[in-house]
Amino acid sequence: MKMNYFVFGTNNKKSAIAFYDALFDGHDINRIYSEGRMTLWAGDDFLFGIAEPYDGNPASNGNGTMLGFNVGSSDAVENLYHKAIALGGVDEGEPGLRSGRFSAYFRDLDSNKICLFE
């Protein structure tokens, strides 16, 4: 079995789209769909989206939920982490070695936690 895609809920679609458009810029990940309540970005073996909740209730992030992006190198970890913070993301762990892997952690504009690792 292979994971196919991941979607975060958002309470501000316009801001979330701007955040992820800028974060993914220059990394061979492009917005492929944006209609109604959902927006998707894709790359090689990569499909990620944001959506306003279908049930109409506010989006909420899971306590203990985290998404990891394998970005391929420590330079990419550094670059994307600093870009995320500059775009309004919140630091959850600066770039560095953890358990033998170079990684960094941040929260997006809706407080969803993301790990970047090489």
Image: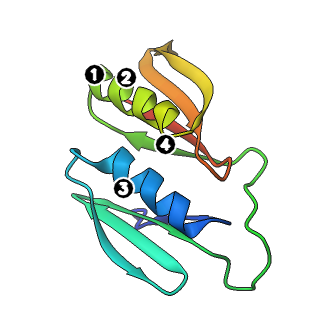
Q: Where is mark 1, residue-wise?
A: 75
Residue found at x 66% / y 53%: 110
Q: Which residue carries the number 2 mark?
A: 78
Numbered disc in front, either 4 or 1: 1
Q: CA distance from mark 4 to mark 2?
A: 15 Å
Give residue 6's position: percent from left, percent from top.
49, 63
Give the number of the disc on residue 68. Answer: 4
Q: In this picture, is 19 found above or below 47?
A: above
- Of tags 2 and 3, the one toward the viewer is 3
Cα separation between marks 1 and 2? 5 Å
Q: Quick check: marks 1 and 2 in contact, CB under 8 Å?
A: yes
SS class of the residue under badge 1? helix
Residue 79, picture quadrant: top left
Query: Image point 27% across, 48% down: which residue?
Result: 25
Q: Nearer the viewer, residue 16 or 118?
A: 16
Q: Amino acid at mark 3?
A: Asp
In primary-sequence order, the first of circles 3 and 1 is 3
Residue 29 drawn above or below residue 83? below
98 relative to 51, above or below: above
Report helix, strand or loop for mark 2: helix
Asked if the residues shown at circle 4 and circle 1 are in contact, with their CB atoms under 8 angstroms apart, the answer is no
Per the rendering, the mark at residue 39 is none
Mark nearest the camera among 3 and 4 is 3
Q: Residues within 10 Å of mark 4 (few under 14, many from 20)?
A: few
Horizontal and vertical percent position of residue 117:
41, 30
